Image: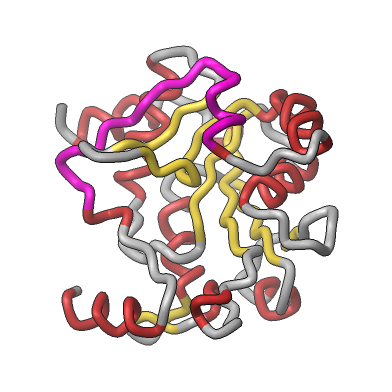
């Protein structure tokens, strides 16, 4: 099905029911400790690409960040930190976003995938709506991309309990719920993420 079809579906959905969330709260050890969301790719911070994509599907956007919060606030969206200072991974950022959001649904993207597009997120939201799922997750022909999600905000208590039990693996939490899979077998390159300076340089040369 065409991207025009996917866009038609999402246009029928009230954007005001979606909050977009950029997950930018990691330590970025492999990037030498730099705050990845603020690293430049083609002259723009990585987080800017995520914000552009989310703006295609959601009226409200939150940025989950644990460092440089004043800098992130300069992008014009509320900034929320994890509830703990221990950098507990993407689920900790998701939990903070679910607690802060006012809408019934949330769409998440990481801050380090600059090829993410609004079309990618249209497809994700469409899968979520079409299958009446708890959570929709992106998948290409080889693997899941579990930080690209569309989910119900009322799963917040489930996530609180999961993290409260000491667990951190995102796949295990997803498996507790009714999942829909948004198929990106035709566009796996959209999920390229930047973890090191070398990967950043290579992507700049390719793109």
Q: Which residue is painted at 19% across and 82% down in the image?
A: 205
What x and y, as percent, mark residue 177?
57, 18
Q: Indicate left or right for 110 with 168 as reference.
A: left
Q: Quadrant of residue 63?
A: bottom right
Front residue of 2/190: it is 190
Q: Which residue is painted at 48% across and 52% down in the image?
A: 55
Front residue of 51/66: it is 66
Instruction: Give the total of numbered labels.
Output: 0
Q: Which residue is painted at 50% across and 46% down in the image?
A: 147
Q: Indicate left or right for 145 with 86 as reference.
A: left
Image height of 53 relative to 172, above or below: below
* Magenta span includes 1: no
In the picture, the quarter occupied by the C terminus is bottom left
Front residue of 18/86: it is 86
What x and y, as percent, mark residue 201?
29, 84
* Magenta span includes 177: yes
Write the start and end of the magenta stretch as one range.
171-188
Q: Which residue is painted at 38% across and 34% down in the image?
A: 124
In the picture, the quarter occupied by the N terminus is top left
The colour scheme used to paint the residues is secondary structure
What x and y, as percent, mark residue 105?
61, 30
Q: Residue furthest front?
A: 166
Q: Indicate left or right for 81 with 113 as reference.
A: right
Q: Quadrant of residue 182?
A: top left
Image height of 53 relative to 164, above or below: below
What x and y, as percent, mark residue 119?
30, 45
Front residue of 10/161: it is 161
Image height of 165 relative to 40, above or below: above
Image height of 145 relative to 176, above or below: below
Q: Quadrant of residue 68?
A: bottom right
């Amino acid at each position: 099905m065409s991207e025009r079809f996917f866009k038609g579906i999402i246009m029928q959905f009230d954007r005001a029911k979606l909050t977009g969330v950029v997950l930018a709260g990691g330590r970025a050890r492999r990037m030498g400790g730099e705050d990845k969301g603020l690293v430049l790719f083609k002259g723009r911070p990585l987080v800017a690409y995520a914000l552009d994509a989310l703006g295609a599907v959601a009226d409200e956007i939150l940025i989950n960040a644990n460092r440089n919060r004043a800098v992130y606030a300069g992008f014009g969206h509320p900034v929320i930190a994890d509830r703990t200072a221990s950098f507990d991974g993407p689920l900790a950022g998701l939990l903070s976003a679910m607690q802060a959001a006012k809408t019934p649904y949330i769409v998440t993207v990481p801050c380090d995938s600059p090829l993410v597009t609004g079309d990618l997120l249209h497809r994700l939201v469409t899968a979520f709506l079409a299958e009446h799922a708890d959570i929709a997750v992106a998948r290409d022909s080889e693997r899941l991309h579990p930080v690209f999600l569309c989910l119900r905000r009322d799963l917040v208590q489930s996530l609180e309990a999961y993290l409260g039990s000491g667990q951190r693996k995102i796949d295990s939490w997803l498996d507790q719920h009714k999942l829909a899979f948004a198929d990106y077998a035709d566009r796996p390159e959209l999920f390229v993420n930047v973890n090191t300076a070398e990967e950043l340089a290579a992507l700049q040369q390719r793109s």
